[in-house]
């Protein structure tokens, strides 16, 4: 199983990788939405995407819109992991097609809880 | 909501202590900002503020080593800057979330504090912690508070 982490911060991608990898996912990474699409094309088996909102080149909300516009990616679970905390922005993200919303800062438990909530299959989860 | 120093402290604690496990101890602000490095983000809405995070190179490296779970001295300068900018991004984003209105958060910017302007505009906030034995200072610089006229026009829109 593959998960894709899209965030312009390498440090944040590393933190997310350290949480998600032990759950049984192989990880692909991208620094912005355009790279994210390249990774999706390279790894059609990606089932989970963790995506930031504020990024250069293509931001997270435009990435989500584009993913949801493509029927090939219908099965992908999308979690927005971001510092955008206003209710209006959360609502916009959910209406755009995000399955869950996780605010930074977060703990591993908070992310796991979100993944369970949206029914992400985690092979190595005890 | 009136944003105060206690809220700025709590956001910093949430980011550095609760998420990253870094111990923070409040301390008196130092004056040697010119030898520090700064990562900043800008918040633009009806209110315009800049969140600046200051640290010396040793503290920046320590924070980055925690974020990358890396050994001491193993990270590149770019990785250290990236980690420090993400700290500013998280603090700034959470400050923005307390404003109670939609605003835009810039991407983080990194630089030297050499040309830093010591005088803070009215309404600005400053808090300092000791982290890994070094000062970590967060400044919320008020660039433009919303005028009553502007707030009124947004509310009625």
Image (spheres, coloured by chain):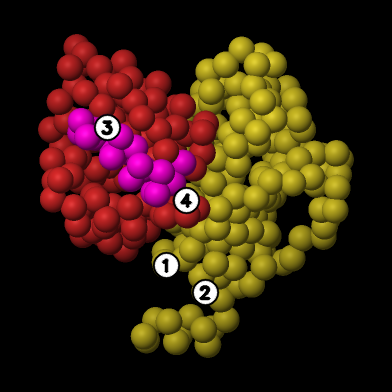
Chain colours: A red, B yellow
User: Do circles 3 and 2 both sit on a common chain?
Assistant: no
Q: Determine whether the residue tagged by mark 1 lies in a helix, strand or loop.
A: loop
**Label 2: chain letter:** B
Q: Determine whether the residue tagged by mark 2 lies in a helix, strand or loop.
A: loop
Q: Residue B89, relative to residue B44: is it above or below?
A: above
- Residue assigned mark 1: B101
Which residue appears at 21% of the width and 23% of the height? A1
- Residue assigned mark 4: A55
Q: Give the number of the mark in front: 4 or 1.
A: 4
> Label 1: few (<14), some or many (≥20) within 10 Å?
some
Q: Is residue A54 left or right of residue B122?
A: left
- Image quadrant in which you'd find residue B61: top right
Which residue appears at 85% of the width and 39% of the height? B35
- Residue A103 in picture, x, y percent from top left: 37, 43
Q: Give the number of the mark in front: 3 or 2.
A: 3
Q: Give the number of the mark in front: 3 or 4.
A: 3
- Residue A46 included in the magenta stretch of the image: yes
Which residue appears at 44% of the width and 46% of the height? A32
- Residue B92 included in the magenta stretch of the image: no
Q: Which residues are magenta?
A: A31-51
Tag 2 and tag 1, C-beta contact below 8 Å:
yes
The C terminus of chain B, quarter of image: bottom left
* Numbered label attached to residue A43: 3
**Label 3: chain letter:** A
**Label 1: chain letter:** B
Which residue appears at 42% of the width and 67% of the height? B101
Q: Determine whether the residue tagged by mark 3 lies in a helix, strand or loop.
A: loop
- Residue assigned mark 2: B46
**Gap in angstroms between the C-alphas marked 2 and 1:** 8 Å
Sequence-wise first label, 3 or 4: 3
> Label 2: few (<14), some or many (≥20) within 10 Å?
some
Q: Residue B74, relative to residue B83: is it above or below?
A: above
């Amino acid at each position: 199983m593959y998960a894709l982490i899209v965030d312009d911060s390498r440090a944040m991608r590393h933190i997310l990788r350290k949480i998600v990898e032990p759950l049984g996912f192989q990880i692909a990474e991208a620094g912005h939405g355009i790279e994210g699409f390249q990774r999706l094309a390279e790894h059609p088996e990606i089932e989970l995407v963790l995506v930031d909102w504020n990024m250069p080149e293509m931001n997270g909300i435009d990435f989500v819109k584009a993913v949801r516009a493509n029927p090939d990616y219908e099965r992908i679970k999308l979690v927005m992991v971001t510092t955008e905390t206003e209710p209006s922005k959360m609502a916009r993200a959910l209406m755009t097609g995000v399955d869950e919303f996780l605010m930074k800062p977060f703990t591993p438990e908070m992310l796991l809880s979100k993944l369970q909530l949206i029914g992400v299959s985690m092979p190595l989860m005890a | 909501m009136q944003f105060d120093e206690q809220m700025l402290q709590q956001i910093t604690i949430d980011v550095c202590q609760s998420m990253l496990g870094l111990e923070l101890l409040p301390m008196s602000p130092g004056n040697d900002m010119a030898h520090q490095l700064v990562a900043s983000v800008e918040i633009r809405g009806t209110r315009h503020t800049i969140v600046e995070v200051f640290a010396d190179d040793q503290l920046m490296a320590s924070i980055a080593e925690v974020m990358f779970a890396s050994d001491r001295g193993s990270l590149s300068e770019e990785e250290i800057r990236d980690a420090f900018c993400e700290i500013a991004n998280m603090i700034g984003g959470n400050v923005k979330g307390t404003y109670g209105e939609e605003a835009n958060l810039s991407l983080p910017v990194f630089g030297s504090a050499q040309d830093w302007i010591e005088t803070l505009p009215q309404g600005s906030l400053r808090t300092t912690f000791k982290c890994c034995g070094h000062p970590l200072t967060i400044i919320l610089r008020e660039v433009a508070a919303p005028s009553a006229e502007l707030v009124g026009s947004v509310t009625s829109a």
